[in-house]
Amino acid sequence: MFVKVSVLKAQKLRVAYTAFAGTFTILWLGKEAGLYQKYGADMDLLYIGSSTRAVQALLGGDVDIVYSAAGAVVDANLAGADLTMVGCQYDTGQTSFFTTPPITGIAALKGKAVGVSRFGAFSDFVARHVLIKNRLQPIKDVALLQLGGTQEIIAAMQKNLVQGGSISLPLTLQARKLGFRELLTTETIALPFDYGCFIVKSSQVRTKRETIAAYDLAIQEPALAKKAIGKYTRTTDSETLDATYKENVKDYALRVPYVSVAGLSSIIDFRAEQTAEAKKLALEKMFDNSLLHEIQKEITAPK
C-alpha cells in the first residue's frame, strides 16, 4: 500500500527512491499502473543513488518524499534534521548470510573476515547482528572489511579475501550458483528492521491524507508487478523476477505499512554503538502511524 502525504505548497509530489531493488516494487507498480494519478497525485519518481543524498534533496526542497530505510531518518535527525516516517513497507530485514564453502557455521568465522558494503550500511548492520547473535565480537573476533557493494562482497569471497557477507536478491541467485553456503536466510536472521519507509519533513505532514492500494494490485496482478520490476531493474530473467516478486511482495510487504517500533529501535541501538547521542533521540517523534490507523479502520469497517 502506498501512502500519499499532502505536502505544503506542493502540487506535484516528487518521490525519491534510492536503489534498483525489489524493495521498491510496490512504489514502481503504483506509477506504472497509473494509481497515483487515479487518486489525484501528480507523482514523479526520481532515482537518487544513496539515502544520504536523497535526504539532502528532501531537506533542500528538491523532493517531497524519500522512500528509503529508517536509518536515513535516524542519521538525519542525529545531524539536527526533523524528519518523520509515515509508513514503512517492511519491518524485517530481507537478506541471506552467505559464507565460502569451507565455513560450515558462524562460529567458524572466528579469526576470519566478513565483507560489508560500507560501515553503517544494511550489510554492516546484518553482519554485526549475525556475529553478536552467535557470540562473536565484530572487529575483535571477526574482521569487517568495507568493500563498496554487494558485487564486491561476492568478488572478495571468490578470492577468499573475506569468508562471509550479507547478500540480498537478486544477487542471492548468483551467490548460490557460485557455490557459496547460504547459512542464514531472512527467517533465521530474524532482524527487526524498518525500510521501504515514506520519509517527509515533520513540518510538511498534514492531517488530510489518502491512500493508494498498490499493494493490493501487486497481489492481484503479479504479472504487472513483475513487469514493473523488470523495467526498473532492467531484468528479463524469469527466475530473478519470480524470486524478487515473491520475497518483496508476497512474503514480506505489509498491506498496511505501519512503522515498527521494534525495527526502528534496533536501528537506533545499532547507531548508538558508534554514536551514543543516538540514544537521546525521541523515538516517538520519528514516525506517525495515525494515517495508517485510519486506513486500518477503513479496511476492517463493515461493508
Image (cartoon, grey):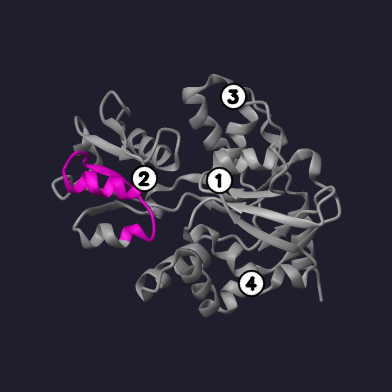
Residue at horizontal 45 percent and vertical 64 percent from the top: 233
CA distance for labels 2 and 4: 32 Å
First in residue order: circle 4 vs circle 3: 4
Badge 2 amino acid: Gly
Q: Nearer the viewer, residue 14 or 131?
A: 14
Foreground mark, 1 or 4?
Answer: 1
The residue labelled by disc 3 is 279
Q: Is residue 56 left or right of residue 163?
A: right
Element type where label 1 sits in the image: loop
Asked if one can make out residue 262 in the rendered structure from this viewpoint, the answer is: no
Badge 3 amino acid: Lys
First in residue order: circle 3 vs circle 2: 2
The residue labelled by disc 1 is 69
> In the image, is residue 146 part of the stretch drawn in magenta?
no
Foreground mark, 1 or 3?
Answer: 1
Rendered view: 258 above or below 248: above
The residue labelled by disc 2 is 149
The span shown in magenta is 149-172
The residue labelled by disc 4 is 216
First in residue order: circle 1 vs circle 4: 1
Does the CB distance between marks 4 and 3 fall below 8 Å?
A: no
Badge 1 amino acid: Ala
> In the image, is residue 154 part of the stretch drawn in magenta?
yes
Badge 4 amino acid: Asp
